Image (spheres, rainbow, N blue to C red):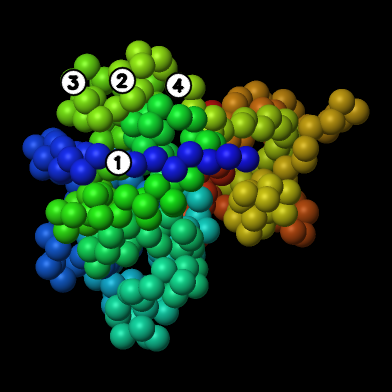
């Protein structure tokens, strides 16, 4: 495959930073560069923002930092409590990785983030993108986090499909032009913010864009369809809920859904045309979207005082144990039976 290596005009980063200074959103993790909370807030927010929108993360972030006030406190907080604070945000492996990473940084790194990408990527839950963006935000290193927003901005500036661009080479070749203002942390955030608010996937604000004179996409008048659309996987499941008159439901550690392993769920079986459930009552059918998975769910129930040995009773209304959002949606359905 032939990649296009492009040259960026020197005034591009200045235009984007100027726009950012005047239009950036007020987000709770955006503290001053010298703030003692900088590392903690940036680490926490980047873990939360993995595969989750900003507007969804904000209330969870605010609630989390009220309970766990700094990085040292995070390193000593139990995983169980962290999961409880994370409850509802989804992708719970992030919470576990955050807990492990905080312990390593505090106990083995003298409460400092490693300054080299190769070292930071050894921390649980931190890959190429998160490593680059943390090094930019925490240490002002000349790096960009190559998320969908940044790739979209660059691909439109050159009016090329993403698969034909070598983004790492573009940044390396244009390093002096991109980072000449030395506001590397601001540029990293500005590029993401710009892609989210101006250079949007659909209906980009091209006519009011401050970099349109730099943009071959704007000059062409064509709309490039990006090639990284997420493939949707469809699955059908039958879920079987044991209930009792105490408003409890039987749950077990899940071994059926790979994306919710080790969490408490009812009995789940992948749907088959041969399935017959004479002893079960059909409750409802509903759809559940988890990332790129579209789940078609048939919910069955029965009232019983006895349950299989692998199940334990859990209250439908209050639990000290962590309950994932997927299970809570099941709770809301069966609550209608009482």
The picture quadrant where one finds residue 57 is top left
Viewer-side residue, 108 vs 255: 108
Chain-order first, disc 2 or disc 3: 3
For mark 3, give the secondary structure: helix
First-in-chain label (4 vs 2): 2
- The residue located at (68%, 40%) in the rendering is 241
Quadrant housing the C terminus: top right
3D distance between C-alphas at marks 2 and 3: 11 Å
Any part of residue 83 in sight: no
Above or below, 321 relative to 159: below
From the viewer's perspective, tell me whether residue 223 is left or right of residue 282.
left
Quarter of the image with the N terminus is top right
Dot in front, 3 or 1? 1
Q: Mark 3 sits on what residue?
A: 208
Q: Nearer the viewer, mark 2 or mark 3?
A: 2
* Residue situated in front as seen by the camera: 168 or 266: 168
How many angstroms separate mark 4 from mark 2 (CA)? 10 Å
Q: Which mark is residue 224?
A: 4
Q: Secondary structure at mark 2?
A: helix
Give the percent coordinates (x, y) of residue 275. Answer: 86, 30
Q: Quick one: SS at disc 4?
A: loop
Dot 2 and dot 1 residues touching (CB under 8 Å): no
Return the residue at label 2. 218
Q: Establish if 198 lies above or below 303.
A: above
Secondary structure beneath disc 1? Answer: loop
Nearest to viewer (mark 4 / mark 1): 1
């Amino acid at each position: 495959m032939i990649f296009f290596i492009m040259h960026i005009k020197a005034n591009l980063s200045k235009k984007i930073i100027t726009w950012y200074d005047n239009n950036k959103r007020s987000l709770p993790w955006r503290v001053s560069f010298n703030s003692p909370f900088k590392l903690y807030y940036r680490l926490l927010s980047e873990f939360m923002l993995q595969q989750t929108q900003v507007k969804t993360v904000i209330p969870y972030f605010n609630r989390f930092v009220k309970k766990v006030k700094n990085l040292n406190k995070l390193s000593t907080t139990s995983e169980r409590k962290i999961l409880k604070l994370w409850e509802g945000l989804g992708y719970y492996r992030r919470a576990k990785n955050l807990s492990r990473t905080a312990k390593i940084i505090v106990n083995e790194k003298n409460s400092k983030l490693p300054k080299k990408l190769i070292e930071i990527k050894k921390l649980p839950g931190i890959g190429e993108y998160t490593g680059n963006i943390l090094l930019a935000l925490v240490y002002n290193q000349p790096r960009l986090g190559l998320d969908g927003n940044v790739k979209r901005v660059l691909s439109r500036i050159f009016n090329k499909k993403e698969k034909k661009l070598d983004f790492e080479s573009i940044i390396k070749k244009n390093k002096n032009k991109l980072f000449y203002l030395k506001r590397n942390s601001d540029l990293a955030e500005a590029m993401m913010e710009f892609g989210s608010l101006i250079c949007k996937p659909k209906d980009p604000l091209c006519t009011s864009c401050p970099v349109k004179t730099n943009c071959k996409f704007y000059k062409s008048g064509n709309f490039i369809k990006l090639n990284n659309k997420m493939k949707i996987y469809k699955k059908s499941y039958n879920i079987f809920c044991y209930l009792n008159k105490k408003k409890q439901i039987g749950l077990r550690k899940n071994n059926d859904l790979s994306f919710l392993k080790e969490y408490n769920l009812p009995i789940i079986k992948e749907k088959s045309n041969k399935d017959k459930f004479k002893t079960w009552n059909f409750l409802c059918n509903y759809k559940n979207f988890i990332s790129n998975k579209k789940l078609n769910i048939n919910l069955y129930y029965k009232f019983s005082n006895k349950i299989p040995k692998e199940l334990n009773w859990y209250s439908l209304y209050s639990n000290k144990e962590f309950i994932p959002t997927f299970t809570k949606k099941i709770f809301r359905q069966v609550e209608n039976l009482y």
